[in-house]
Amino acid sequence: MKTDSSVWNREGLSDEQLVTLLRTMLLHRLLEARGFQLNRQGKIPFASAGEGHEAVQAGAALAFTRGKDIFFPYYRDVGLNLGIGLSPYEVMLSLFGRAADHSGGRQFPHHYASRALGIATISSIIAAQLSHAVGAAYAMQLRGERDRAVLTTFGDGCTSEGEWHESLNFAAVHRLPVVFLCENNQWAISTPLQHQMAQPDIWRRAEGYGIPGRSVDGFDPIACYAAVREAFDRARSGGGPTLVEAKCYRYLAHTTDDDDRTYRSREEVAAARQHDPVPNFEQLLIDRGLLSAASATALKAAILNEINEATDRAEAMPYPAAEELYARVTADAHEPWRSSSPPHSI
Amino acid sequence: MAVSTQEQTTTMNNVEAVRHTLYEAMKNDDRTVILGEDVGARGNVFLITKDFIEEFGAQRVIDTPIAEASIVGIAIGMAMEGLRPIAEIQFADFIYPAFNQIVGEAAKTRYRSNGEYTCPMVIRTPYGGGVRGALSHSISIEALFYHVPGLKIVAPAFPADIKGLLNAAIDDPDPVLFLEHKKTYRLIKGEVPTGHYTIPLGKANVVRPGTQLTVVSYGLYVHWALDAANALANEGYDVEVIDLRSIRPMDKTTILTSVEKTRKLLIIHEDNKFGGIGAEISAMVAEEALFSLDAPIRRHCAPDVPAMGYAEPLEHEYMSSPTKMADAMRELVRF
């Protein structure tokens, strides 16, 4: 991002919205760092991180209309979920696996489900959520709900799945109101882009489906907002789906169970760090006079305080009762096997 | 038997019963959509949805690309967003690409979201052999999905049961895999009550009472088992035949009540024996009613080979018959 240019395309965003972007990015960054800390302290079994995805996620979240749109995320979308209204406390409940977590402590961290926020339930299976997004968009279109649209996100790794193709194709055929947002971080766990695809511009595949494709700097939150906003506008005006590819980078290992030193060089990661969107965007807002250095420091302190409170509050919450294992398999009375009692009763 | 709100009945074969029930569902609820390969302009390869597209429109009768995984996945998204989709897999043999969407997604939607999202959808598919369908048009798939909590599996044999159970499946707030034996489509006819009715999922039906042997089956083989049992009656053997109708949930009560009476159990199905539906039923009866049994539980099922062949002798060898079933019943009654 060029901070020295006198021309600054704010894409119509107000000062308040720009500070909101930064706030979401900082919250994302610091909250996920807390997840890794808690894992290293032995307090939680697992954490993953979208460090390097902050700009694209905060930008996309700003284009999402809460109360109308539906979001079918993937597991690396903590920032996007925060940006559309998820609280740090809910993130911590998820990490700690507490009873009050959206899934009741069943799901892996960051698999949220909230009708109020418009966050759909997902599994960890790559590309499985895309056809759900398409089906939900079909329902909106069938009912003539022209002011609503669906956002679904995925990594570069997802684009190798057959269901990725099936979903884009069906959405294109029916001109469904879906925004397909690829967060291309260059790595599918340990497999780099060049081993995933011969043609590295994922957005170019849109032409094959007869839909618009856009490439955007995934480290530029304003550009990401604009690209996703344009795709939402098209979706809501009957223009059908758009494929947006935001090129970013995954700064950390895939998860707390991964060690990326085994497959990529420190030099590569360090080079990508030069473009780190979080300090860069903070500096931009300071340079443009939206924020003083002191208020930026205060903002980070306030966010850290919020995260500390969320951590303590969630940690103090109870685990689900063991009986919850048997609940909500189906709406009617499902009779699960239990080793401690006869498996069947007459 | 089915409870009707009206006394009137109509004679239908199985394919007509499916068509009639789908038609009523489409007519009575705007949320209902049908999606699958060739369900629209062609009206399904068995003409089950013929002319639906003219009456209900291409938006509700959706000809999909050939992409089974997303047929089910799109239906899941529709169901999560308030529609009542009925997805069709053209032949059960083609369901494998949709395995994750059925097992990993649909069956776990309620559980993984702690009830925040649900997946009220039906996946219909014709299955079964005896039609020279060879390796990819005659498979039984139920055992592959039987293992999955959160998924109901229905496999009716009679037209009246098809209507009542398909209505129940459409009404059910969770995903239902609805299996239609394609050889019974035009072979089996029966009286179907005219009005709307449902038959509870998970309730078996004693289609022939008897005292000396319990036979449990489903699908086409219910009809052949009845033929065999009726033939054995001439030899003085009294065989009870249970039509499971719903494979899962399993109706333990009906099975156990019968076994307590007859003290002998034979499970008959067209699917492979190894790891099949019969294995679970026999394990259940062994755990619950071992000391009521006067003979070992027997399973009369398909051999453990990949599939029936196209050539007539290969299909014939794979499939059972009323004669083979009668032999198995006779042997167990005499035990």
Image (cartoon, rainbow, N blue to C red):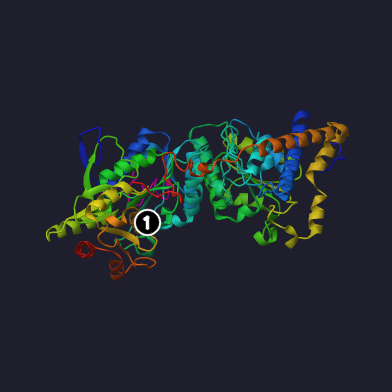
Of the 4 image quadrants, the one containing the C terminus of chain B is: bottom left
| Coordinates of residue B179 in the picture (x, y in percent) | 35, 51
Q: Element type at marker 1?
A: helix
The image shows residue B155, relative to residue B326, as above or below, that is above
Where does the magenta region start and end?
B35-53
Q: Chain of mark 1?
A: B
Residue pictured at 37% horizontal, 67% vertical: B304
Left or right: where does residue A290 sit relative to residue B242? right
Of the 4 image quadrants, the one containing the N terminus of chain B is: top left
Residue pictured at 75% horizontal, 60% vertical: A261
Instruction: Name the foreground residue: B182 vs B176.
Output: B176
| Coordinates of residue B99 in the picture (x, y in percent) | 47, 54
Instruction: Name the foreground residue: A82 vs A258.
Output: A258
Residue A227 visible: no
Left or right: where does residue B149 sit relative to residue A94? left
Characterize the magenta stretch by its predominant secondary structure.
loop
Residue pictured at 27% horizontal, 67% vertical: B316
| Coordinates of residue A60 in the picture (x, y in percent) | 68, 39
B37 in magenta = yes
| Coordinates of residue A129 in the picture (x, y in percent) | 56, 46
Question: What is the crowding at mark 1: few (fewer than 14 residues within 10 Å), some, or many (at least 20)?
Answer: some
Quadrant housing residue A311 = top right
Residue bearing mark 1: B280
Amino acid beneath label 1 = Glu
Quadrant housing residue B318 = bottom left
Residue A76 visible: yes
